[in-house]
Image (cartoon, grey):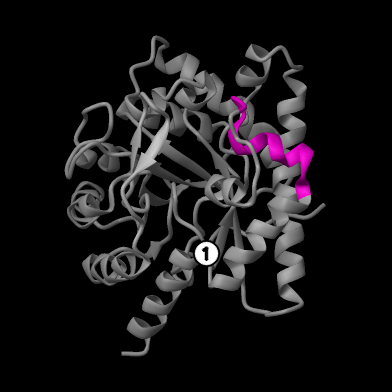
């Protein structure tokens, strides 16, 4: 069985960008509650193609297209919960296929992170952006733990817990991880301002909680406005006491209108690049993109990373 290596964050500087963004640009309808995950079955080659484009743009690490996958989410859609386990394994396999294909073009090291969204993603109602759930920490722990089992069995090297909105959910993730001590993970928060996660707790408090865990390889900030990131890096470092690498992958700079379900504003890759330089200088170990970013943004991040490493 293939077993991926844990991510070596001393070597990783460039993460990938948005999967859903690229699939939409390629004509896929992502209105399903499963979002980009439904393409795993309907057009797996497209998933491999997006991974490859990010690797060719310079990404050192790609995240699987499994953010929206959970047994709970599948049950609520009237599907067998065991399908979620299969799809989690499929997403990991497609990322490995992309890595193997890319290795024939370029032998540089490439890491894979198995993407898992928060509980709010399974509700299909945007709750991940406020974190006001009606379940307790024990139930949240079970939600996350049941997804870790098939990924651990499939040899995942690192889990990317993404868009985490609250301290409570971070606590649940730590509890779930302790059940599978062979796994490492990064935990990345979505933030509502330059100091607080979406639910309202100080980012410092959240990162302080995570810093003591040997299974947490890095702490992140994602799905957040880019203009907030510089100060958030400092908050994350302060809370963690500089004991964990900080990674960031914000949105493009466009804003989401939940009422009309549309994006507004513009995405400027040059500005994203100038902010990337600032984020690296502030102490970010690795940088990528989230919603509305694409290979052009990641190519710009890679260009900045190369220029700064050569100084």
Q: Does the magenta stretch include residue 148?
A: no
Residue 48 falls in which quadrant of the image? bottom right
Query: Residue extending furthest bottom?
Result: 311
Relative height, residue 54 to residue 213 (above, below): below
Residue 212 falls in which quadrant of the image? top left
User: Residue 72: horizontal and vertical position, in percent?
Assistant: 61, 17
Front in this rendered view, residue 32 or 184: 32
Front in this rendered view, residue 265 or 144: 265
Query: Residue extending furthest right?
Result: 1
Q: Residue at horizontal 78%, vertical 38%?
A: 42
Relative height, residue 81 to residue 207 (above, below): above
Left or right: 131 with respect to 46?
A: left
Query: Quadrant of the image for the C terminus?
Result: bottom left
Q: Which residues make up the magenta segment?
A: 32-44
Q: Residue at horizontal 68%, vertical 79%?
A: 107
User: Residue 288: horizontal and vertical position, in percent?
Assistant: 43, 60
- Principal SS element in the magenta part? helix
Q: Residue at horizontal 19%, vertical 55%?
A: 234
Relative height, residue 244 to residue 150 (above, below): below
User: Residue 43: horizontal and vertical position, in percent?
Assistant: 77, 44
Q: How many marks?
A: 1
Q: Residue at horizontal 62%, vertical 65%?
A: 53
Q: Residues within 10 Å of mark 1 (few under 14, many from 20)?
A: many
Relative height, residue 299 to residue 171 (above, below): below
Label 1 sits on residue? 295
Q: Is mark 1 on a helix, strand or loop?
A: helix
Q: Is residue 33 magenta?
A: yes
Left or right: 295 with respect to 256?
A: right
Left or right: 273 with respect to 184?
A: left
User: Residue 208: horizontal and vertical position, in percent?
Assistant: 26, 42
């Amino acid at each position: 069985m293939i077993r991926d290596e844990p991510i070596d964050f001393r070597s990783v500087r460039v993460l990938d960008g948005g999967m859903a963004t690229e699939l939409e640009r390629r004509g896929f309808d992502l209105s399903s509650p499963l979002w980009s995950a439904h393409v795993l079955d309907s057009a797996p080659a497209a998933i491999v193609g997006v991974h490859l484009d990010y690797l060719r743009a310079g990404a050192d690490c790609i995240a699987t297209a499994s953010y929206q996958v959970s047994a709970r989410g599948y049950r609520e859609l009237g599907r067998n919960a065991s399908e979620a386990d299969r799809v989690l394994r499929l997403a990991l396999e497609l990322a490995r296929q992309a890595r193997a294909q890319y290795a024939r073009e370029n032998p540089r090291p490439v890491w894979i992170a198995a993407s898992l969204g928060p509980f709010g993603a399974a509700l299909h109602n945007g709750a991940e952006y406020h974190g006001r759930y009606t379940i307790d920490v024990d139930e949240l722990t079970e939600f996350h733990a049941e997804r870790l089992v098939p990924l651990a069995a499939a040899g995942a090297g690192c889990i990317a817990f993404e868009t985490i909105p609250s301290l409570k959910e971070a606590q649940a993730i730590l509890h779930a991880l302790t059940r599978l001590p062979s796994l490492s993970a990064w935990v990345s928060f979505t933030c509502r301002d330059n100091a607080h996660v979406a639910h309202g707790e100080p980012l410092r408090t959240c990162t302080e909680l995570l810093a003591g865990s040997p299974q947490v390889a890095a702490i992140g900030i994602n799905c957040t406005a880019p203009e907030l990131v510089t100060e958030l890096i400092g908050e994350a470092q302060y809370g963690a006491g500089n004991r964990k690498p900080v990674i960031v992958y914000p949105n493009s700079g466009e804003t989401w209108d939940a009422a009309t379900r549309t994006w507004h504003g513009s995405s400027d890759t040059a500005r994203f690049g100038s902010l990337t330089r600032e984020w690296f200088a502030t102490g970010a170990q690795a940088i990528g993109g989230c919603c509305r970013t694409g290979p052009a943004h990641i190519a710009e991040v890679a260009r900045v990373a190369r220029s700064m490493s050569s100084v």
